[in-house]
């Protein structure tokens, strides 16, 4: 069983000894990894599609982990109950809006869990806002670069937190203040992409193009400020 660095990094954010709900478990590789590495105490793994659920059951049985991993065919966390004792909800590899919809689908369970570990593929700023708006604070973030793409992993605990600036929701307060080379490369990539779009729009003219150019220039000014801060934190 081969796991990508993205999946390993996401699983590694789960607090050791927790009872975990692995949502959208697919083949249950993450669930199996969490048990085999001694991270999770017990797991309920769910997937909305019957095919992945059947494969998950087979994989778990072959690993001899049926007593520690229960599989349910379920839409998100709709079939998770407070009595299941879930401490961590883990959701990986979905769009941010879908993740928010999943968490909204069972607010009673979300209000009882201690931790969320999520890896949204899109709309990350909205996810960060949603976490703050629903009583979570972001205690850790990690960015992984794999197969030419950047992935952000977020670990959130119960608590009160709000960022002062919108760019902290866009690019991650934790990542800005705890940078590494991957984060800096990501920010530089966005800056370069914005510059390419600006050059393209300059030749088009028109009010809408000029407005977009101004937005991109403002974004790049923020990025330049963030990268400078990151480099200072890194001692570059």
Image (spheres, rainbow, N blue to C red):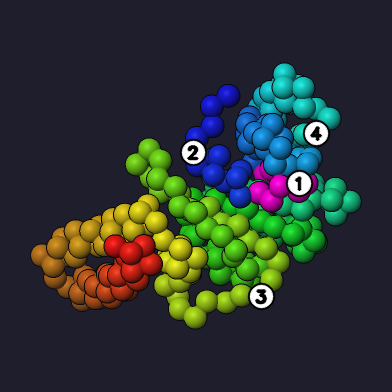
Which residue, given by chain and number where applicable, does mark 4 sit on?
A: 68
* Quadrant of image for the C terminus: bottom left
Q: Real-space Cα distance between discs 2 and 4?
A: 24 Å
Could you tell me residue 174's position as x and y percent?
A: 50, 65
Label 1 vs 4, first from the N-terminus? 1
Which residue occupies 72% across, 25% down?
Answer: 60
Label 2 vs 4, first from the N-terminus? 2
Task: Decide which of 221, 48 is in the foreground and name it.
Answer: 221
In the rendered structure, are the residues bearing label 2 and label 4 in contact, judged by CB atoms less than 8 Å apart?
no
Could you tell me residue 41's position as x and y percent?
A: 78, 41
Hey, which residue is sitting farthest front in the picture?
235
Which residue, given by chain and number where applicable, does mark 1 sit on?
A: 17
> 10 Å neighbourhood of mark 3: few (<14), some, or many (≥20)?
few
Question: Does 76 lie within the magenta span?
Answer: no
Residue 224 seen anywhere in this rendered image of the structure = yes
Q: Secondary structure at mark 1?
A: loop
Q: Which mark is residue 160?
A: 3
Q: Secondary structure at mark 3?
A: loop
Q: Which mark is residue 5?
A: 2
Label 3 vs 1, first from the N-terminus? 1
Q: Real-space Cα distance between discs 3 and 2?
A: 31 Å
In the rendered structure, are the residues bearing label 3 and label 2 in contact, judged by CB atoms less than 8 Å apart?
no
225 up-or-down from 113: above or below: below
Q: Viewer-nearest of labels 2 and 1?
A: 1
Q: Which residues are magenta?
A: 14-23
Label 3 vs 2, first from the N-terminus? 2
In the rendered structure, are the residues bearing label 2 and label 1 in contact, judged by CB atoms less than 8 Å apart?
no
Residue 197 seen anywhere in this rendered image of the structure = no
Which residue occupies 36% across, 62% down?
Answer: 234
Q: Real-space Cα distance between discs 1 and 4?
A: 12 Å
């Amino acid at each position: 069983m081969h796991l990508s660095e993205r999946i390993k990094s996401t699983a590694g954010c789960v607090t050791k000894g927790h009872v975990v709900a692995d949502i959208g478990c697919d083949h249950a590789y993450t669930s199996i990894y969490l048990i085999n590495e001694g991270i999770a105490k017990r797991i309920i793994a769910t997937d909305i599609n019957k095919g992945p659920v059947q494969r998950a059951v087979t994989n778990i049985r072959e690993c001899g982990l049926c007593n520690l991993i229960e599989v349910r065919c379920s839409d998100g966390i709709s079939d998770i109950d407070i009595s299941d004792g879930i401490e961590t909800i883990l959701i990986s590899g979905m769009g941010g809006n879908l993740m928010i919809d999943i968490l909204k689908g069972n607010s009673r369970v979300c209000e009882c869990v201690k931790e969320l570990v999520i890896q949204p593929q899109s709309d990350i700023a909205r996810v960060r806002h949603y976490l703050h708006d629903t009583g979570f604070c972001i205690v850790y973030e990690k960015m992984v670069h794999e197969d030419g793409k950047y992935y952000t992993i977020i670990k959130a605990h119960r608590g009160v937190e709000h960022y002062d600036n919108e760019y902290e929701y866009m690019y991650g307060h934790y990542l800005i203040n705890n940078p590494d080379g991957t984060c800096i490369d990501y920010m530089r990539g966005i800056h370069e992409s914005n510059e390419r779009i600006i050059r393209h729009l300059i030749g088009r003219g028109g009010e809408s193009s000029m407005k977009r150019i101004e937005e991109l220039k403002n974004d790049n000014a923020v990025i330049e400020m963030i990268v400078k801060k990151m480099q200072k934190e890194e001692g570059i």
